[in-house]
Image: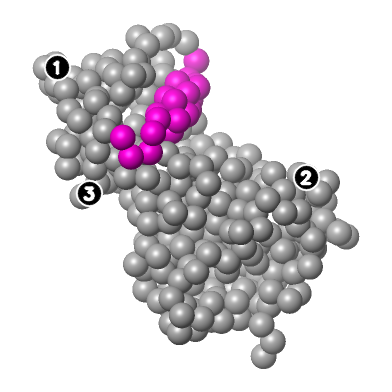
Amino acid sequence: MRCVFRLSRLFLFVLMVALAPIASARDAGDAALFEGFRAADMRLATTGFRLSTANAALCDREEPGHGIQIHTLDQYAPRPRPAVAAHFGFAGAVAVEGVVAGGPAEQAGVRADDTIVKFGTIAVAPQGEGAPSTDRLVALWTAVAALPPAAPIRVELLRNGTPLTLTIRPVPACRTRYELAITAALEASANGDLVRISSGYYDRFDVDLVAVVIAHELAHNILRHRERLKAVGAEFGFLSGFGRNADYFRQAELQADILAVHLLARAGYPADLASRFRQHPVAKARSGIFQSPSHPHWRDRLRVALAEEARIAADGPGAPFVAERDSPLTGDWRPLVPKD
């Protein structure tokens, strides 16, 4: 579980756009850039929604699974805000970047580029000025996530300037926010509430294979690995690969690998997806002298994936380690790796 903070897509987008000349909201270059980011965000949002809703029964913290990907105008730098607002139809501070196909929001009639005025009991404050910030986005997600996971949600919108009220009937979902970081590096992390993954994965792997990485990070959140690592005094960062720290982190990584295979199966992904990911040349190349000792070797991770896939084929998906997520980590990772 990598816990190093990386610039999110939002701030990289701020820098990229702020440095580019802005002539018109209809400029083809700007439009292509904006739509590229929307498409990238929705790939992650769609996979996250699928995994979070299919595995809600395994999560002790749930949120309403509504299928809306939101973005806020104040997450962009002041200079490009007019172009951003025009392209995405912002008529206020928060807008719908996209909706998951077939999800509750789409079924209710919510569309991309609707402006959100009120989400249930949560009113959106007027747009502010100043430096870019994701505070509003995170605050809104946190408030919405605290709503009853299956209760209808009345949303007030503006569509092309016209007020519109719709009712979304969400489904329970694991409480996790998904965020894309634009970088060629292969980076993924989970902190208990957030799963962050870099766009570099989508550059190198098919979309279905990237679901293995997302499921692994979601498994960390379900198993509360970050707080459990802190509870046993594990050192994060550079020291995570040394001494007893490495044992704790390897245990957490292998537990997440194992549970992820079951999360994927519950969400209807191909039965051999995890093992195919582990055998991908890029995944294999990452495991070597440059890999932190806190992470198991790819051969061990492949053995785990193959064993779990065989177990699921025989008995169906289960919920490994979920019952012990309130217990301290022991660092005993070796029994988790099947022997040849």
Q: Earlier in the sequence, mark 3 or mark 1?
A: 3
Report how far apart the C-alphas of labels 2 and 3 lie in the structure: 40 Å
Residue 219 in magenta stretch: no
Residue picked out by circle 1: 163
Name the residue beneath numbered marker 2.
231
Question: Residue at left 24%, top 46%?
Answer: 103
Q: Which mark is residue 101?
A: 3
Q: Residues within 10 Å of mark 3 (few under 14, many from 20)?
A: few
In this view, the residue in front, 227 or 160, is: 227
Q: Nearer the viewer, residue 111 or 169?
A: 169
Q: On the rendered structure, is 91 left or right of 334?
A: left
Three-letter code for the amino acid on which mark 3 is drawn: Ala
200 left or right of 149 in image? right
Q: Disc 2 marks which amino acid?
A: Ala
* Foreground pick, 106 / 171: 171
Is residue 233 positioned above or below 300 on the image?
above
Q: Which residues are magenta?
A: 131-151
> Looking at the picture, does residue 122 appear above or below residue 244?
above
Residue placed at 51% from the left, 42% from the top?
Answer: 61
Q: Position of residue 124 (x, y in %)?
A: 35, 16
Residue 37 appearing in the image = no
Disc 1 residue type (three-letter): Pro
